[in-house]
Amino acid sequence: MMKRTAQLLTFFAVMLLTAVAFAAEPLKIGALFSVTGPPSFLGEPERNTAQMVVDEINKSGGIKGRKLELVTYDTAGDATKAVQLANKLIKDDNVVAIIGPSTTGETMAVIPVVEKEKVPLISCAAGSKITDPVKPWVFKTAQNDGLAVIKIFENLQKNKINKVAILTVSDGFGASGREQLKNHAAGYGISLVVDDTYGPKDTDMTAQLTKIRGSEAQAIICWGTNPGPAVIAKNVKQLGIKLPLYMSHGVSSKKFIELAGDAAEGIILPSGKVIVAEQLPASDPQKSSLVGYVQSYQKIYGVAGDHFGGHAWDAINLVRRAIEAGATTRETIREQIEKSSNFAGIGGVFNFSAQDHAGLSKDAFVLVRIKGGDWQALD
């Protein structure tokens, strides 16, 4: 009799827990992406990828039976709007975490909000200042621009190039890249013989490039996001400048090749591995995630998943892993993300800690050359 009673109690307990799980409200994750405006080439794949991953999680039954709800707002690349929408996500939508924004400038504007309200933020932007110094509630999935600089400088050093011109965009991403270029140059025996800038909305950089042509520069490094770098590539070709042209990871998508056309040929840049996923050896710990992501995105959206969408893939999956570990509140999700280790994502193999909220090494980058309108791995 007692055994029968115990079985019934167990049965009802299981049924009750199951009912609670199914009745539980979805966990809301906020997302801030520049789906429109100049950085839309970043925000659109990020938005698409985040929704794709959440849909996949929900179709498989959710996390421990609990569904996710993605609440996405378009910042249009506007830092002021990003702050307003971050407050809306926190106070009106009651999200447990926020992924994004797409750009460094927007992220830096949002950081004081999430730090004050104690909401975990996983930025998809690259600026080193986002997580340096470490801020308790702020993480990032895009590779640090300092790591991209090292990747370029190692290649310059290998090719015995030690006089370089830098041309950086005058926004948050460009300022951070310029700072990293200046910080690391001496360590690789490189002199920056020209240090010039351009505006995010400039449509002709022949003045700066004419100055570079008359200098001792042996190579040019352009640091920016579309469309400016595509204009620079075209201007370089129009002026007949034969110097090697390096770009930042800020143009690591087919959109740049489309914008620059033939002028993109031969340009070298550091990138996440996703754009050369099929060229990687089977032993690469990221290959399975990379190929799976590229194919899933292609199936839904008709184009291959890219470097930028990958930042959102990593961000959502970091939150997923935290929830799978039992976290359901803002504080516990933050704690679990900080404990994440050996997570082979799209941007690299992440190892976060209390001292490191960027989580990646320079191995997260590969150096690629644009050849025949496509990417060729150089590493």
Image: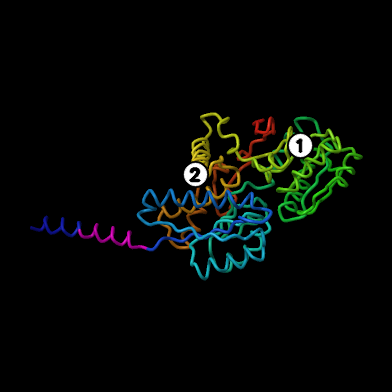
Q: Within 10 Å of the Cα at label 1, are there few (<14), some (14-19), or many (20+) other Cα atoms?
A: many
- Pick the residue in front: 325 or 35: 35
Q: Position of residue 239 (x, y in %)?
A: 86, 38
Q: How is the image coloured?
A: rainbow
The three-letter code of the residue at mark 2 reads Ile
- Pick the residue in front: 220 or 78: 78
Q: Secondary structure at mark 2?
A: helix
Mark drawn on residue 263: 1
Cα separation between marks 1 and 2: 31 Å
Q: Position of residue 249 (x, y in %)?
A: 68, 43
- The magenta span reads 12-24
- Which secondary structure type mostly characterizes the magenta part of the structure? helix
Residue that badge 2 annotates:
300
Q: Residue at x 50, y 46 (%)?
A: 341
Please identify the quadrant where the N terminus is shown.
bottom left
- Pick the residue in front: 377 or 176: 377
Residue 11: quarter of image: bottom left
Q: Is residue 177 left or right of residue 283?
A: right
Q: Residue at x 20, y 60 (%)?
A: 12
The three-letter code of the residue at mark 1 reads Ala
Q: Position of residue 156 (x, y in %)?
A: 76, 34
Q: Residue furthest left?
A: 1
